[in-house]
Image: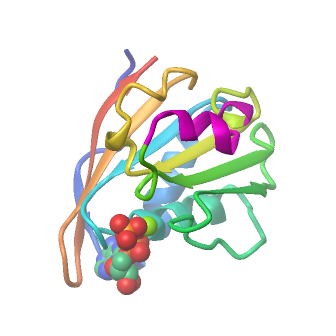
Amino acid sequence: MSTPFVTPRTFTMSDVGAIAQEIVAALHGGDAVLLSGELGAGKTTLAKAIAAALGVRETITSPTFTLMNVYTTNHPHISTLMHMDTYRMERVEELAEIGVNTYMGEPSTVCIVEWPERFPDAWHRARTAHWFTVSGTGETRTIQAVTATA
Ligand SMILES: Nc1ncnc2c1ncn2[C@@H]1O[C@H](COP(=O)(O)OP(=O)(O)OP(=O)(O)O)[C@@H](O)[C@H]1O
Ligand SMILES: [Mg+2]
């Protein structure tokens, strides 16, 4: 167990980049960022900002339908970003079927997972799994670091 590294806060769209930079500054290769929150809470928006903070130059698209997207970053220790969404998955076996194990816990890869709570026990391959909740509607959202499990 390690200490969650983002203090709870309420933020607007214009603060997303700064929060993402804080998260990236504390991440190690092999870590997972698990983003829980209602439909439309802002998980993909935060994932896009984390990708930008990692130096991903490609356009980040929501993995709601593609399930998993993989990007090359431009960062000294983290070379790959995997971004996935389990919302449309029915069975835990689908994670292995789409190739999650190729990325989760790999030393130079960071994985972002939307809807991680659908398969709460599936993320143990990560070096550290950092659980966040994103909540709220309208102009502001709230992020909380819930736990970090190693
Ligand atoms: N911090 C924020 N402040 C204000 N609006 C935001 C914020 N983050 C996201 N939004 C808005 O909320 C909407 C939904 O955001 P987003 O797609 O990131 O949600 P999501 O949690 O990924 O949803 P889903 O569960 O469907 O994957 C977008 O239109 C976005 O502009
Ligand atoms: Mg989303």
Q: Position of residue 101 (x, y in %)?
A: 67, 30
Residue 67 rendering spot, x and y as whole percentages: 58, 58
Q: Is residue 15 visible?
A: no
Residue at 60%, 43% (x, y): give it. 111
With respect to residue 72, does 16 lie above or below? below
Magenta run includes residue 101 = yes
The stretch in magenta equals: 91-102
Q: Quadrant of residue 46?
A: bottom left
Q: Which residue appears at 46% of the width and 51% of the height?
A: 89
Left or right of 88: which side holds 132?
left
The relative height of residue 21 versus residue 3 in the rendered view (above or below) is below
Question: Which residue lies at the image location 50% right of the left edge and 25% below the top edge?
Answer: 128
Say if residue 102 shows up in the picture.
yes
Task: Report how many numbered discs are placed on residues in the image.
Answer: 0
Magenta stretch, main secondary structure class: helix
User: Vertically, is 42 above or below 113?
Assistant: below
